[in-house]
Amino acid sequence: MQTYAGPIKNVLVEKNLLEGGGYQLGLNQTKYPYSDLRAIDNRFTGTGWGPAYVQGGKGWTQWKDNFRYSSSAADARGAVVDAP
């Protein structure tokens, strides 16, 4: 998510399987601010550069129960993904 076209607020990213060749979830404050962004109970494959990053701004308002994806673990919960 990037704030190049305007402010971003009140976003909930919840119960997703995120994967990709770069970062799976990025937060980038450019010209405008962001606020009230929450990431809860997501799974990240960790491919590419890693699960998540924050560039500029305060970061996530809430970061909770986010894990690396593990097909063999209960609820696919592998290692904890710490807040970026």
Image (cartoon, rainbow, N blue to C red):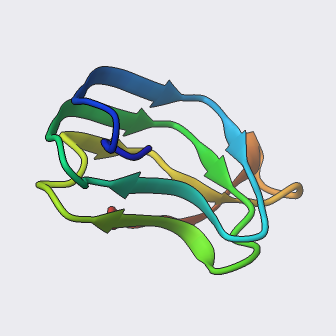
Above or below residue 61? Residue 58 is below
Q: What residue do we see at 73% from left, 42% from top?
A: 17
43 or 34, which lies in front?
Answer: 34
Residue positioned most to the top: 10
Q: What residue do we see at 77% from left, 60% from top?
A: 20
- 71 with respect to 42 (left or right): right
68 or 35, which lies in front?
Answer: 35
- 65 with respect to 69 (left or right): left
Q: What residue do we see at 34% from left, 34% from top?
A: 5
Above or below residue 10? Residue 82 is below
Above or below residue 83? Residue 48 is below
Q: What residue do we see at 40% from left, 38% from top?
A: 39
- 74 with respect to 27 (left or right): right
Task: Give the image location of residue 27, x and y in percent.
Answer: 37, 53
Task: Give the image location of residue 30, x and y in percent.
Answer: 25, 55
Task: Give the image location of residue 4, x and y in percent.
Answer: 33, 44
- Number of numbered labels in the structure image: 0
Residue positioned most to the bottom: 49
- Locate the N terminus and report the quarter of the image it occupies: top left
29 or 82, which lies in front?
Answer: 29
- 65 with respect to 78 (left or right): left
- Locate the C terminus and report the quarter of the image it occupies: bottom left
Q: Quadrant of residue 38?
A: top left
Q: Quadrant of residue 75?
A: top right
